[in-house]
């Protein structure tokens, strides 16, 4: 039974990816303006624009261009940038490393902090600690990413003067001091946004498990509250907690676009925003697919963890 559900979930993920690729390709086709006209400028003649469109293959039917792009993407051929005349894979690879560094540092900080606060709030539910954590998380969730980023700049860069407002030199940072200056502001912003969701979902998952009869039975047999949570409740809440982590980290996909733009961080999101302004379709499509695949991968891993950790499905 679990392996059937695993295969079913993987099949749904592949089907979703095909639908998403269709949506990404045709959504970028709807962007206003003509690529050939933008590249040649307003002074270009209609004949020159038509010739460039034919040379770039833009005069072919959209469905044929979609299939060609999709099969090329599956082979690892992301196409050639319209603006830079370079392979999109070369443009994306360096920026992707920077984005993965930012996501990795944020994950290393946010996951332990969020799990500790979420589990602690569940263990001491109703206490002053639980109330403070709940108020802070609700306050952060209520504020959008760009507002958190703006407040971080005002506090740490303008008022205190501890950190730079922009992430200059993130790609070349080798010393701890340089890395701290480059990554501090984006990581602080993303950690606030991601942790708040994760704390609330972890707290709810652990409380739901604590209220089950077998955990209450352990408490009646004399188990301490700490042992009851860590040994009996937490292992059975692994699936919901994995879902909470995956769903919260998926906010990185959307939040990183705002954060990289505000702090001028040289990642994939900043590259995609710049590509939109020049209507560089192959670059936009490749960056968008990277974000969609990342989101889909996180959600699929969460679902698979929930399936495999469910004791009723392992029998």
Image (cartoon, rainbow, N blue to C red):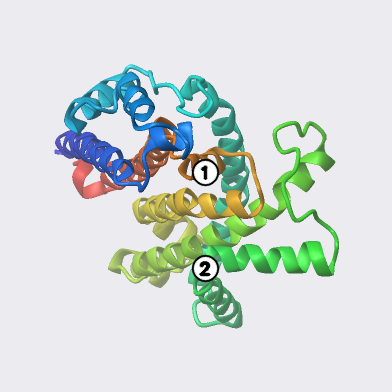
In the picture provided, is 54 more to the left or to the right than 168? left
Instruction: Report the front residue among 204 and 163.
Output: 163
Residue at (19%, 39%) from the top-left corner?
A: 12
Instruction: Please identify the quarter of the rendering in which residue 301 is found.
Output: top left
| Front residue (pair 2, 219) | 2
Instruction: Confirm whether residue 228 shows in the render.
Output: no
- In percent of width and height, residue 192 lies at 59, 62
Gap in angstroms between the C-alphas marked 2 and 1: 18 Å
Does 229 sit left or right of 161 as displayed? left
Residue 34 in the image, given as x and y percentages of width and height? 36, 39
Q: Quadrant of residue 234?
A: bottom left
Asked whether residue 99 is in view, the answer is yes
Looking at the image, residue 154 lies above or below residue 59? below
Residue beneath the point at 66% across and 66% down: 150
The residue positioned 65% from the left and 52% from the top of the image is: 186
Identify the disc placed on residue 269: 1
Q: Position of residue 298 (x, y in %)?
A: 38, 43
Report crowding for label 1: few under 14, some 14 to 19, many 20 or more residues within 10 A (C-alpha).
many
The residue to which callout 2 is attached is 144
């Amino acid at each position: 039974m679990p392996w059937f559900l695993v295969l079913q979930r993987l099949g749904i993920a592949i089907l979703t990816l095909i639908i998403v690729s269709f949506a990404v390709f045709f959504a970028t086709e709807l962007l206003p303006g003509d690529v050939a006209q933008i590249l040649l400028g307003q002074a270009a003649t209609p004949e020159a624009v038509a010739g460039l469109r034919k040379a770039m293959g833009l005069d072919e039917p959209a469905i044929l261009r979609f299939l060609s792009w999709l099969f090329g993407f599956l082979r690892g051929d992301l196409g050639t940038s319209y603006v830079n005349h370079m392979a999109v894979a070369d443009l994306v690879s360096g920026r992707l490393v920077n984005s993965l560094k930012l996501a990795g540092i944020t994950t290393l900080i946010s996951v332990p902090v969020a799990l500790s606060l979420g589990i602690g709030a569940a263990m001491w539910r109703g206490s002053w600690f639980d109330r403070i954590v709940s108020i802070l998380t609700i306050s952060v969730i209520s504020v959008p990413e760009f507002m958190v980023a703006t407040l971080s700049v005002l506090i740490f860069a303008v008022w205190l003067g501890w950190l730079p407002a922009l992430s200059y030199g993130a790609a070349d940072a080798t010393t701890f001091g340089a890395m701290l200056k480059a990554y501090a502001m984006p990581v602080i912003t993303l950690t606030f946004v991601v942790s708040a969701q994760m704390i609330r979902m972890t707290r709810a998952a652990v409380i739901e498990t604590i209220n089950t009869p077998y955990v209450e039975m352990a408490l009646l047999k004399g188990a301490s509250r700490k042992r009851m949570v860590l040994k009996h409740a937490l292992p059975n809440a692994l699936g919901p907690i994995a879902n909470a982590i995956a769903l919260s980290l998926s906010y990185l996909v959307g939040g990183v676009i705002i954060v990289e733009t505000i702090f001028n961080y040289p990642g994939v999101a900043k590259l995609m925003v710049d590509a939109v302004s020049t209507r560089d379709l192959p670059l936009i499509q490749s960056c968008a697919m990277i974000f969609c695949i990342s989101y889909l991968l996180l959600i699929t891993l969460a679902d698979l963890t929930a399936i495999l950790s469910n004791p009723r499905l392992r029998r």
